[in-house]
Image (tube, rainbow, N blue to C red):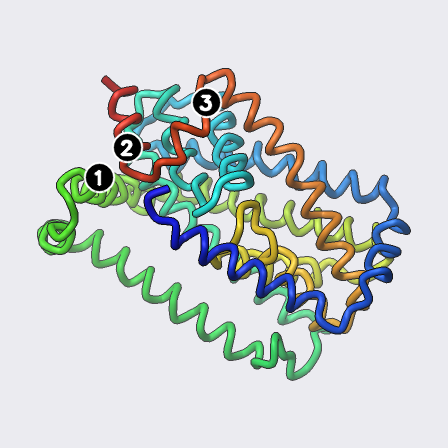
Amino acid sequence: MRHPWRAVLGFGVTALLIWWVFRGTDVPEVWAEIQGANFWLLGLAVAIATSNYVLRSIRWGYLLHPIQSGTSFRSRFAAVNIGFMATNLLPARAGELVRPYALSRMEPVSMSGAFGSLVVERFLDALTILALVFVALSAPGFPDQAVVSGVSLEVWIRGVMVVLGGVLLFMVLLLLFPKPLVSFAEKVVGIFPGRISRFLLDVLEAFLDGLGVFQRPALLLRAGLWSLAIWVVQSLAFWVAFFAFGIDVSFDVALFVNGMVALAVAAPAAPGFVGTFHAGVVAGLGVYAAPPAAALGLAFGLHLGGFIPVTIIGVYYAWKLGISFGDVKGGEPRIDGAAAEASD
């Protein structure tokens, strides 16, 4: 591993968050909550969450269209599952690079082009999640003066809005003034070795191509609607899981908890979002004063249940494509080199 500090940071964050979610909690009580869960409902929640990889694969086709039209659903579905499998099993969020690499093995799409489309995808995800969180905040049952981890929820939301606003401004500037910004980027990435700087510039250029979806209203509308479907379905999975653990709440609570989890898993962590996922669930349900043991039991049950299907599917497709852990454990330059060879 070329950058071991990433793995060290991730495992450190996971250890800290695992301590945080268990502090003041009786472990046998958490285990009792897991044993007493309705496993039929939990299985349904896992099935709903797993179906989201189908929706993600459909949406990705619209985001890839400005770069390469006509990619097959099967290729996109395989790449999506391989990417999440890699994120579950490898450190440093390797799936973010494995997913575009896998697609480049099956379709005439460069790795940098596929990676650029994922940057646009993340922005759409963030906008959609924020919109759904605002729906939850507007619900009559939302607690007054809500606090998350000792910080006012209003402060958290303002922070997220500042970040999203900055990203949106950057995208607008890229659309309006692409050449000056690319020239500036060429100077900045010049400090890196030639192979890495070339890859970064390729990603930037592909990202500019991916931004073409914002200039095509029909494509943008479809991608936006699929984004909405993805996160509503994910919230539905949480809602069903709530009932599996005896947490009887309205759907808006699921929208809020889903948003908290999405924010939490953006932080560095050990493979598979261990710790960050659990902290997001506990913090989100804590706003609604849900029993801590039930919230933590739900977090472990849904996390493990969701971990297994996509990992198995991803391993299967990786095996079919001949992708091994050795292809990705060396880091970004190695993946880029493999992708370049695959496209020759």
Tell me the amino acid under the disc marked 3: Ser
**Most distant residue in the right direction:** 36
* Viewer-side label of 2, 3: 2
Q: Indicate the secondary structure of the residue bearing disc 2.
A: helix
Please indicate whether residue 133 sits to the left or right of residue 207 in the image. right
Residue type at mark 1: give it: Phe
Residue 338 in the image: x percent, y percent? Answer: 30, 26
Question: Secondary structure beneath disc 3?
Answer: helix
Which residue was labeled with disc 3?
Answer: 75
Q: Quadrant of residue 308?
A: top right
Relative to 154, say whether 173 is above or below.
Answer: above
Residue drawn at x 60%, y 26% as measured from the top left: 313
Q: Residue furthest bottom?
A: 145
Q: Residues within 10 Å of mark 1 (few under 14, many from 20)?
A: some
Badges 1 and 2: C-beta atoms under 8 Å apart? yes
Between the C-alphas of marks 2 and 3, the distance is 19 Å
* Alpha carbon separation for disc pair 1 and 2: 7 Å
The dot on residue 199 is 1
Disc 2 or 3, which lies upstream in sequence?
A: 3
User: Which quarter of the picture shows residue 106?
Assistant: top left
Quadrant in which the C terminus is drawn: top left
Residue at 63 percent across and 71 percent down: it is 138
